[in-house]
Image (cartoon, grey):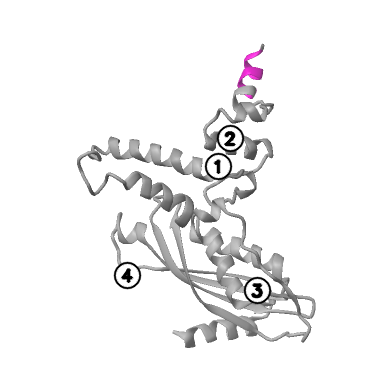
């Protein structure tokens, strides 16, 4: 076998395992096997729910717990006699899988769409929506607010106000950077609502700046995504942004 062929096979797993073979692997390896076999990306801010089988989240949580126990051990923390950290690995695993990173492991929440019977075509603003995320560089919290502007047309699908918050929460509950998060949210809303215009503004505090590094407690990051009519019509964009300033 040539060196080139050996290298290629080392980089690309041979995806020919049967279910009984997969069952012998840790949950993380089984899930990764399916993702790679489907030629799908699995970055920190990607959703991989479709590759997770029933019962595997509990197994994945147990695996994370075991790894986290090793991290605490490497930090020279006596988790056996220290009553404050005896259950820390278990708590952290549950927090990652079920709470702060659940947007990776759970499918998108059900969203009922309604036809625009009244042919609404005026600017609608939803927010501020409180969102919580995490920086994928240091896994530190990102806490902020989002405002969403929608300019529907007669063919748009309308969704309830609470659904905007649910979709935003699902997108944000994963490790990422703010610039990519708002784009992912815009993509999700554009696909479902199909408006003439869509605008999103996010303002957030990043604890990777507050807690570590420069330790600047006053800095916040604001960024926006403008699509369709909001991108083409400066008057509409100005109206949206001016209404946000009045809310402050």
Q: Which residue is mark 4?
A: 218
Q: Nearer the viewer, residue 114 or 201?
A: 114
Secondary structure category for the residue under label 1: helix
Q: Which residue is mark 1?
A: 56
Which is more foreground, mark 3 or mark 2? 2
> Could you tell which of marks 3 and 1 lies nearer the N-terminus?
1
**CA–CA distance in space, label 3 to label 1:** 37 Å
> Could you tell which of marks 3 and 2 lies nearer the N-terminus?
2
- The image shows residue 227 at horizontal and vertical percentages of 66, 71
**CA–CA distance in space, label 2 to label 1:** 9 Å
> Could you tell which of marks 3 and 4 lies nearer the N-terminus?
3
How many labels, in total?
A: 4
Q: Which mark is residue 198?
A: 3
15 in relation to 208, above or below: above
Locate residue 215 relative to residue 148 in the image: left or right.
left
Secondary structure category for the residue under label 3: strand
46 in relation to 182, above or below: above
């Amino acid at each position: 076998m040539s060196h080139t062929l050996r290298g290629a096979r080392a980089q690309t797993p041979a995806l020919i395992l049967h279910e009984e073979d997969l069952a012998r692997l840790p949950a993380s390896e089984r899930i990764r096997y399916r993702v790679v076999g489907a030629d799908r990306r699995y970055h920190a801010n990607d959703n991989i729910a479709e590759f997770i089988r029933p019962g595997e989240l509990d197994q994945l949580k147990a695996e994370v717990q075991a790894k986290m126990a090793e991290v605490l051990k490497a930090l020279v923390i006596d988790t056996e006699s220290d009553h404050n950290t005896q259950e820390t690995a278990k708590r952290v695993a549950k927090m990652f899988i079920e709470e702060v990173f659940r947007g990776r492991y759970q499918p998108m929440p059900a969203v009922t769409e309604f036809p625009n019977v009244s042919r609404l075509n005026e600017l609608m603003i939803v927010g501020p929506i409180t969102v919580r995320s995490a920086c994928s560089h240091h896994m530190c919290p990102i806490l902020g607010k989002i405002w969403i502007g929608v300019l529907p047309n007669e063919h748009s699908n309308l969704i309830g106000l609470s659904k905007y918050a649910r979709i935003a929460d699902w997108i944000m509950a994963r490790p990422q950077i703010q610039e990519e998060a708002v784009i992912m949210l815009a993509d999700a809303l554009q696909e479902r609502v199909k408006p003439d215009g869509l605008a999103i503004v996010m303002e957030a505090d990043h604890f990777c700046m507050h807690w570590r590094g420069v330790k600047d407690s006053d800095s916040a990051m604001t960024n926006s995504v403008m699509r369709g009519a909001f991108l083409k019509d400066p008057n509409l964009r100005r109206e949206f942004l001016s209404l946000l300033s009045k809310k402050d």
